[in-house]
Image (tube, rainbow, N blue to C red):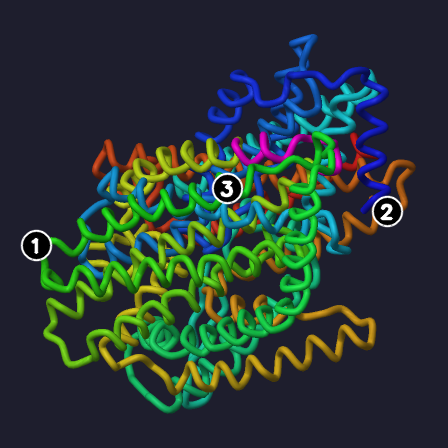
């Protein structure tokens, strides 16, 4: 770590006196504009498949391409742009919770200021809670921070010589062309000239199962980014959920007639709760593993703080927000949170219990939020912000919040009171989830800043600005998608309803805990299986074999096969590309080009999804671009599959040519 700081300082010395151009107005504005694009894309992708993508690297590439036109731009100014954009893009993961309020019927849409307040207050607390952890988890730690290092390398190359300008131009070209190809194919699927998804359901003995797959460039890109280890873990979960559990469980509940409806209902009612049990155990195991290192790191941070107060001078790259500002800022944020919670309770079935409910929730948010900030920061350092199991943290949060409410009120309540308690649990979880997502991203960005010699307190201010931008953008995007598509399981949801898998699971958990009818049997079996997967992963790690993260297994069981299979294929494709890149003259540049290739695939389709939502909302039709009817399925599937894989080959070949 000391070597990295020396390297950053050396870079500053080569540049001359430290430029004041870091937290500039144009950096904040550019970060905000990028936020509009990437946050919308992440909201759509998360609601469709339950996965989001990291925005740091593409934001850095776009920033460098634009700010190169200004002679006085600096590497630190570009770092601020990616910090603002990545904070807002990461905050989009709040969609893993908030759509649950629509699914249970508490909200009919997404009230702008309430949604923004839930998102913003939790996000700002996430920034503040993680400030004291910077030294513990960023400076005095061996954690790799893979995405933080990658973003730093992008910034270093882009802020350098003519060669850096050429590499930045190549990266931007890959990002744009792959985005356009992804958009073009997504448009074709909406015309129904090519198929976007195909499924075959069939009986297997006394039970039933199926095979399904989606032709999605976004999912292919996600697979490339998560890597082979996570991809194979998800494939293991897919095989267990669809080809082991589903045939057994359907055989225990035999039905005649429509196989798809029969198997689909069993999957939703039983298999996904088995997956939830696996995810919960994986999250608990992560907490246990990192408890010791986090405590040790906090002690180190406190020792450093005492040294600073004794008069020790600090370099710019070691100056955090003052601890007093963090403390009083955190206290100040609890006021709007309390007001928000009061507005939820007032005039409803829970009126008269405001003091107990608000006090309990505030204590819960502070205690659970501090723990989650440490946990998520450590996870980001260990496996990257994109791969961190924040959804598992959300599951633990909603169960804990619901159990807190059961302790206060019990389960013997009327339907209206129970619904209000479920909504309250989801809102409290939404605030805590904001803490989780931002602390997960914050420390990753601070690692990037440390590597390029940035000023931590300026990055922390930029993170707060990014949270504000994100909280203002997310509500209208959510409302647009709700109006155009709706969410699976809610009343009136159409055929294009977005699955919103984590939101559906989290709201189901809240209803189950508070209503007393949670499917504890399948969750229990899933938890037992989760223990087995944890042991398997640890044994594989000890043997030096390819690990199978238990969280990936749980996601593979929980999500539909159509969403998982393209991710698995993408992970294999990414593995072959990275093997090829490792043999190039400049392997790091080749690897970054692979990341931008995958990112372009994700961004293009995701942004088109938001655009298409607007077309659907304006037209009132579920298929406003359809050019052919139902009789064209077979040609659409055959032609679409051929086109999909041909485009994939061409895009990766182009990347190889530019990176080679």
Q: Please name the predominant secondary structure of the magenta segment in the image.
A: helix
- In this rendering, position of residue 546 left or right of residue 93: right
* Picture residue at 38% right of the left edge, 33% below the top: 611
Front residue (pair 130, 62): 130
- Residue 387: image location, x then y, percent: 60, 56
Front residue (pair 132, 543): 132
- In this rendering, position of residue 397 left or right of residue 577: left
* Picture residue at 78% right of the left edge, 37% below the top: 656
Residue that badge 1 annotates:
347
Which one is closest to the eye, mark 1 or mark 2? 1
Q: Are marks 2 and 3 in contact (CB under 8 Å)?
A: no
Dot 1 crowding, Cα within 10 Å, few <14, some 14–19, many 20+: few
Q: Are marks 1 and 2 in contact (CB under 8 Å)?
A: no
Question: For numbered disc 2, what is the local secondary structure?
Answer: loop
Distance from the alpha carbon under mark 2 to that under mark 3: 47 Å
Question: For numbered disc 3, what is the local secondary structure?
Answer: helix
Distance from the alpha carbon under mark 1 to that under mark 2: 62 Å
- In this rendering, position of residue 418 left or right of residue 199: left
Residue that badge 3 annotates:
324
- Residue 303: image location, x then y, percent: 69, 53
* Part of the protein shown in magenta: 450-461
The label shown at residue 582 is: 2
Dot 3 crowding, Cα within 10 Å, few <14, some 14–19, many 20+: few
In magenta segment, residue 156: no
Vertical placement of 292 versus 471: above or below?
A: below
- Residue 138: image location, x then y, percent: 69, 48
């Amino acid at each position: 770590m000391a070597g990295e700081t020396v390297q950053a300082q050396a870079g500053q010395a080569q540049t001359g006196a430290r430029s004041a151009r870091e937290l500039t107005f144009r950096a904040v504005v550019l970060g905000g504009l990028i936020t509009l694009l990437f946050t919308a894309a992440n909201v759509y992708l998360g609601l469709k498949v339950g996965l989001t993508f990291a925005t740091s690297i593409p934001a850095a590439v776009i920033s460098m391409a634009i700010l190169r036109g200004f002679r006085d731009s600096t590497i630190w100014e570009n770092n601020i742009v990616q910090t603002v954009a990545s904070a807002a893009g990461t905050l989009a993961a709040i969609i893993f919770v908030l759509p649950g309020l629509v699914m249970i019927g508490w909200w009919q849409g997404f009230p702008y200021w309430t949604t923004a307040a839930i998102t913003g207050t939790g996000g700002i607390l996430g920034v503040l809670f993680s400030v004291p952890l910077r030294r513990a988890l960023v400076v005095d730690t061996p954690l790799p921070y893979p995405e933080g290092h990658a973003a730093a390398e992008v910034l270093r190359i882009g802020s350098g010589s003519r060669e850096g300008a050429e590499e930045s131009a190549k990266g931007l070209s890959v990002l744009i062309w792959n985005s356009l190809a992804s958009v073009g194919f997504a448009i074709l699927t909406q015309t129904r000239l090519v198929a976007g998804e195909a499924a075959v359901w069939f009986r297997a003995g006394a039970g039933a199962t199926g095979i399904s797959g989606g032709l999605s460039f976004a999912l292919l890109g996600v697979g490339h980014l998560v890597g082979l280890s996570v991809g194979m873990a998800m494939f293991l979960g897919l095989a267990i959920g669809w080809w082991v559990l589903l045939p057994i469980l359907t055989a225990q509940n035999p039905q005649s007639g429509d196989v798809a409806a029969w198997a689909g209902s069993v999957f939703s009612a039983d298999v996904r709760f088995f997956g939830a049990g696996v995810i919960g155990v994986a999250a608990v195991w992560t907490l246990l593993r990192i408890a010791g290192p986090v405590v040790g790191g906090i002690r180190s941070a406190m020792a450093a703080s005492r040294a600073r107060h004794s008069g020790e001078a600090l370099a710019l790259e070691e100056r955090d927000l003052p601890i007093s500002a963090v403390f009083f800022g955190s206290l100040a944020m609890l006021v709007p949170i309390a007001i928000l919670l009061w507005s939820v309770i007032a005039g409803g079935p829970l009126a008269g219990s405001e003091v107990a409910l608000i006090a309990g929730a505030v204590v819960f948010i502070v205690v659970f939020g501090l723990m989650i900030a440490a946990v998520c920061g450590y996870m980001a350092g260990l496996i990257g912000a994109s791969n961190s199991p924040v959804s598992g943290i959300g599951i633990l949060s909603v169960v804990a919040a619901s159990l807190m409410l059961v302790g206060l009120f019990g389960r013997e309540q009327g339907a209206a009171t129970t619904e209000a308690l479920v909504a309250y649990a989801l809102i409290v979880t939404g605030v805590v989830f904001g803490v989780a997502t931002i602390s997960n991203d914050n420390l990753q960005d601070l690692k990037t800043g440390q590597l390029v010699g940035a000023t931590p307190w300026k990055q922390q201010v930029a993170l707060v600005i990014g949270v504000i931008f994100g909280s203002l953008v997310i509500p209208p995007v959510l409302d647009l998608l709700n109006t155009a598509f709706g969410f699976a399981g809610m009343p009136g949801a159409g055929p294009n309803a977005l699955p919103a898998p984590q939101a559906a699971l989290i709201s189901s958990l809240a209803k189950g805990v508070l209503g007393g009818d949670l499917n504890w049997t399948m969750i229990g079996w899933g938890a037992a299986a989760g223990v087995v997967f944890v042991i398997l992963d640890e044994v594989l790690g000890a043997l030096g074999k390819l690990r199978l993260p238990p969280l990936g297994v749980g996601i593979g069981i929980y999500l539909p096969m159509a969403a998982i299979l393209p991710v698995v294929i993408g992970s294999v494709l990414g593995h072959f590309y990275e093997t090829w890149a490792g043999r190039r003259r400049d392997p790091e540049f080749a690897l970054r080009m692979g990341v931008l290739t995958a990112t372009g695939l994700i961004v293009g389709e995701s942004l088109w999804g938001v655009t298409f939502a607007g077309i659907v909302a304006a037209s009132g039709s579920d298929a406003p671009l359809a050019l052919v009817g139902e009789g064209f399925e077979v040609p659409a599937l055959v032609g679409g599959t051929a086109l999909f894989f041909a485009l994939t080959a061409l895009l990766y070949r182009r990347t190889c040519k530019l990176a080679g």
